[in-house]
Amino acid sequence: MTGSSTSDAILERMQRLHPKVIDLTLGRVERCLAAVGDPHLAQPPVIHLAGTNGKGSTQAMIRAGLEAAGQKVHAYTSPHLARFHERIRVAGELISEENLARILDEVYEANGNETITYFEITTVAAFLAFRLTPADWTLLETGLGGRHDATNVIDDPRLTVITTVDLDHQQYLGETLAEIAYQKAGILKRGVPVIVGPQHEEALDVIEREAERLGAPVIAYGQHWHVTEERGRLVYQDETGLLDLPLPNLRGPHQHKNAGNAIAALRHLGFDDTACEAAITRAFWPARMQRLQTGPLIDLAGDAELWLDGGHNPAAGVALAETLAELPPRPTHLICGMLSTKDVAGYLRPLSHLALSLHAVAIPDTTATLPAEETAEAARRVGLPTSISPSVEEALAEIVAKDPTSRVLICGSLYLAGAVLRENG
């Protein structure tokens, strides 16, 4: 096989190596890493990020700041949107198909027939890709939780970052904020400083207690650094002084806090004001309140605005509502598809007073999708007029036929966002 089908075929085989999608433990990934020569032990300085919301945006901003300072940066993130290659950025560039296929094949062969999850074995592949190319930094974003996440095999990161902790993935991480925060705080390492973003008090208490146990210096929002919007500017302040910066190019008030996370990290590492400004003005992170400008869906939308967001938990719903409220007034309609594991009503409740209607869809080619009928029922419970559509395209066509100059937001899942980006070219 040639082209992208090569890596796709290997990835498909990898998905069959474990009966579960998620099975949190470190033993399997450590075994597989050893089988390929422990590439995680030969990384440039690591910045390890965990959190419920904002870790992807924060990572993108840190990377933008480091690269503006002339640094070569490896970056690992998940899930991908359109192509798996998005997960592995080698020295600033998305991994090539040739490199990805070769490394996946090597890791698959080294693993043999041993049981290992898809995320674990692809994380091993990322470490191997990074080891083969020189760089100045490695940015690692946890997949789920932190304590037993496959990325948590680095014993001596240069810095850890914990973005806002909130309720999500309770079936794996615990039912309370304290239990979830304990899992996120598992990335803390003895003596390694941690940047702590805005937190609920219950979560902050857990993080600080774990940090104290490990002797990890805490650099926390509200204590050691502050960030606010003042007269259309982002004002950041810590013990070394004040920065007056443009607003982040990633939209929404929640991105101001993510920008603070990134600036705090860069300042702690000794980077200057230019790197901090670049972090928030040059970062790009798709499907985070992204306005679509080209493609078949835009042709279909006509004079309507078309936006895309992949947030999927109640806190993300609040952040999305705040972002929508800041936009110029315009009739707004939602096209929503979600996974069956999510709190749909909790996500939609903050949006219910901002949207005129919701068109429920199933996420294409996703076994864990919530049926559109169930999304619609949850929307009705929070007061949203609702209908069911067979696809995003048909929902969009129906909306613009009735309200041609409206604002349409496609939302509810990164998996739906990925499907939209693929279909839209």
Image (cartoon, rainbow, N blue to C red):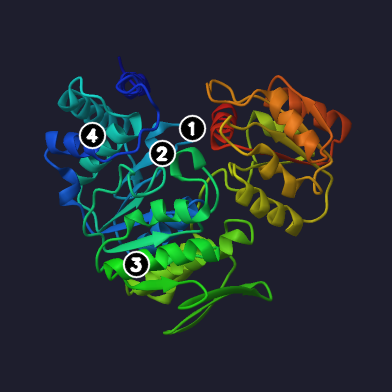
User: Which residue is denoted by mark 1 in the rendering?
Assistant: 82
Contact? badges 1 and 2 (CB < 8 Å) = yes
Q: Is residue 246 left or right of residue 322?
A: left
User: Which residue is denoted by mark 4 in the rendering?
Assistant: 28
Residue type, label 1: Ala
In the rendered image, which quarter contains the N terminus? top left
**In terms of secondary structure, where does tag 2 sit?**
helix
Instruction: Name the N-terminal-most of marks 3 and 4.
Output: 4
**In terms of secondary structure, where does tag 1 sit?**
loop
Q: Residue at x 73, y 34 (%)?
A: 378
User: Which residue is denoted by mark 3 in the rendering?
Assistant: 211
Instruction: Name the N-terminal-most of marks 2 and 4.
Output: 4
Residue type, label 2: Glu
Number of other residues with Cα within 10 Å of mark 4, as a class: few under 14, some 14 to 19, many 20 or more: some
Q: Position of residue 70 (x, y in %)?
A: 32, 63
Between disc 4 and disc 1, the foreground one is: 4
What is the distance, in whole Å, between disc 3 and disc 4 at their CAs?
27 Å
